[in-house]
Image: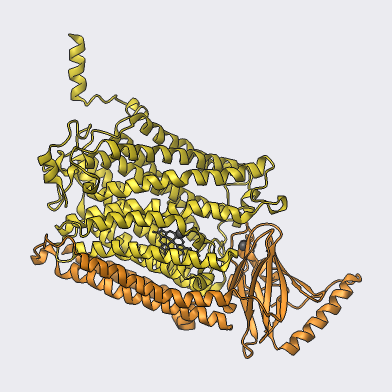
Chain colours: A orange, B yellow
Amino acid sequence: MKCARLGKRLGTLALALLAGGGLPAWGKSGWDELNMPRGVTNVSTRIYALHMMAFWVCVGIAAVVFGVMIWSLIFHRKSRGAVPDVSLTHSTKVEIVWTIVPVLILVSMAIPAARLLVRINNNTDSQLSIRVTGFQWGWRYQYVGSNVSVISKLSESSTAASMMHSGISATSVPHYLLSVDHPIVVPVGEKIRLLITSIDVIHSWWVPDLGVKRDAIPGFINQASFTIAPNKTGTYRGQCTELCGRGHAYMPIVVRAVSPAAFQAWLKQQSALDKEAAAGAPATGVTSS
Amino acid sequence: MAESHDIAVHAEHDQKPHGWRRWVFATNHKDIGTMYLIAAGTMFLIGGLAAMAIRAQLFKSGMKLFDPAMFNSLTTMHGLIMIFGAIMPSWVGLANWMIPMQIGAPDMALPRLNNLSFWILPFAFTLMIASFFVPGGAVAGGWTMYPPLMQQFGDSFPMLIFAIHLMGISSILGAINVIVTIMNLRAPGMSLLRMPLFVWTWLITAYLLIAVMPVLAGAVTMQLTDHFFGTSFFNAAGGGDPVLFLHVFWFFGHPEVYILILPAFGVISEIIPTFSRKPLFGYEAMVYATASIAFLSFIVWGHHMFTVGMPVAAQLFFMLSTMLIAVPTGVKVFNWTATMWRGSLSFEPPMLFAIAFLFLFSIGGFSGLMLALVPSDYQYHGTYFVVAHFHYVLVPGAVFAIFGAVYYWLPKWCGRMYDMRLAKWHFWLSVIFVNVLFFPQHFLGLAGMPRRIPDYAPQFTDWNMVSSIGGFIFGASQALFPYIVWKCVRSGKPVEANSPWEGAHGLEWELPSPAPYHSWTTPPSAAVLAHGAEH
Ligand code: HEM
Ligand SMILES: [Cu+2]
Ligand SMILES: [Cu+2]
């Protein structure tokens, strides 16, 4: 009894703690801060749907199983005078049911997952290919079929703030740790194929809104592709997701999605800049984003 | 004359040597079990301190307590210490204490081997922890030790590999001992399908250990020769393949996670019937489910590598095999639930931990199921969602089961009862704050926070703070545990009956309390066996 009271008191404390830490997050941005983003590609929205389906299936199973457990905890306790039914040790019927039913649930989850998996790994018919090379610590992008190449590293403002004893507060830096000096630019509405590799250790290229995560492995060229919905121009940010040494947290990815026309203009301008650079003039990349 | 006197004196003292000799030359299963548990507790403390340091660094965005390289060393060593230093030796310690008592044997079958497998460990742990202090610091490539990154560390790299070799030898010797003991020293009449489930799950775990520890040893040795002897197993520039290491590592790694959890399944299967005052539901199904989980654990390793670019067919295979594991795992949870159903439940500390295990391990199982769906895993992989998943199965899973086991059997070990009120405090603090600590990490992962990073974007601060606060309180509450055990051993109220738990069955409860030094010097009679039988 005493213990139940104690439990309640501690429960209140935990709730207070959760509320104290958690409510600001809710206030600022609501549910989205707590869940997977829907993203801006067909694949990312389908992954989101699969994720939510799996989540609700789990919630459903939990409601039933935890419900039965809680029922027992409340009504089959000794302090209520419950008498154990010691004959209840085995039931082939029940055991068959709780083996078959999970199998059926699993099959119903596996089918859409398998369909989507096959769809995601189809990298044919792309309109643009970009070679992505991870290095310690940044990304190099080469637009196949043109001489344009972008080296993308953590932005100067984030780098400065991230130093030991920098004295710069993280919140004062726009997109702290999620901004780079030279973002890549891609067109919306076109299927873009990435050819991903690394020159040193394993990295992983991830942009949640695009629904793409692929490892960059030395000696391998991995493929991934995405098509951003035509109305979804904007800036999408991600990070390296494979531990790659002390700079692992400091090699973000920034993708600027623009209209195909704007993309062509950007490519032409970059190409001219790169030629100049090759001719000796210092390269001036895109401004920090 | 003198000789017979000596013998009499020795018999009185159970023939144990005194002072340091008793421990250094230990061959008694209880002494060795105790040393394993103390060593594991020490490593739990060190690994826990590393965790506190990690949570302090992650308290808010822009925090800079440690250099990123040091932070990576901390996460790497935290993982290695907890897995190889805390959880595995705890299970071996419990196996040492309980298997002979539960099967009606006087001791383990190979006592000298037992001594060796324990005494290797302090050297292995010292070597591993000492690597913090060599130039360049401890290995910082994650407990998964992926090359080529792993090749970039200094002297700590060979030290860690040698430590892993030692721990592997210790585990294999321990596993051989468990198998030989169970196969040869069971009381007459205790057929395999009458063994308690803790014995069963440990038997299966021992086979897993023998199967996969050599695989790990091989994988790290190939890294060693790549580094020092010019081979190129994992070096693409020399015609090797870094992904090969991932395959070999996870062929070890997935069975390894079941090495950590199967004995916990055994413990929970002992505790729940006792405090439900009802035999375990579906005993045989439990045995077969454990065996199928162990078998399946060898064919699911690819689910740790969905993003490395395996062929679609391979990804499909690993997705389906992984989902299949959920079936026997579900059977186990349903059987435990059915054991409580129409029982007569009481809530002593071991039962509290077992109930928390049921709920929270299941949550880890649910996130595991979500992770098995490859397209979703593309988004979850390498994020805090995975961190939340494996901490749910390992902390309120394996660690809570270890606490439950100690609270269950401690009165038998020392013939004294611990302070129940304090133990309940330990429970409630642990169960509440383990959730405050790990539940928000699901949100962080989904919102896009990668794992193994020393600093993060400001929008992740709120939930990291909640998680850190939960971590500090959870960590601090664990100080209660050694205190409760110490107080019990020193001055707990003596337990007169063979069993302090009215619903307990099993041979260990047929022995007097405290259990005699040489557990069953004569095999239990058929009558005792029948009395102790649980099913
Ligand atoms: C229903 C059963 C389970 C399923 C379906 C499952 C599935 C998975 C999957 C798919 C991953 C890979 C996630 C990723 O990195 O993308 C994973 C990671 C992990 N799981 Fe489980 N799991 C289950 C139970 C367990 C248990 C019982 C344990 C240990 C007691 C465990 C420990 C781990 C660990 C340690 C990792 C992370 C390894 C690392 O990357 O460092 N899992 N699990
Ligand atoms: Cu990285
Ligand atoms: Cu696994």
Residue at image point 42% right, 40% down: B172
The image quarter in which residue B42 lies: top left
Residue at image point 29% right, 31% down: B28
Which quadrant of the picture is home to ligand 2?
A: bottom right
Visible residue check, residue B476 = no
| Position of A182 relative to B142 (above/below) | below
Is A191 left or right of B274, judged from the image as shown? right
Is residue A271 or residue B300 the one in the foreground? Answer: B300
Give how far across and how far down residue B441 sits, in percent.
45, 68
Residue at image point 27% right, 33% down: B107
The image quarter in which residue B332 lies: bottom left
Give how far across and how far down residue B355 sits, in percent.
26, 62
Give how far across and how far down residue B43 sits, in percent.
42, 45
Quick one: which residue is furthest to the right in this view? A279
| Position of A186 relative to B493 (above/below) | below
Quick one: which residue is furthest to the top in this view? B1
Visible residue check, residue B29 = yes
Count of picture labels: 0
The image quarter in which residue B95 lies: top left
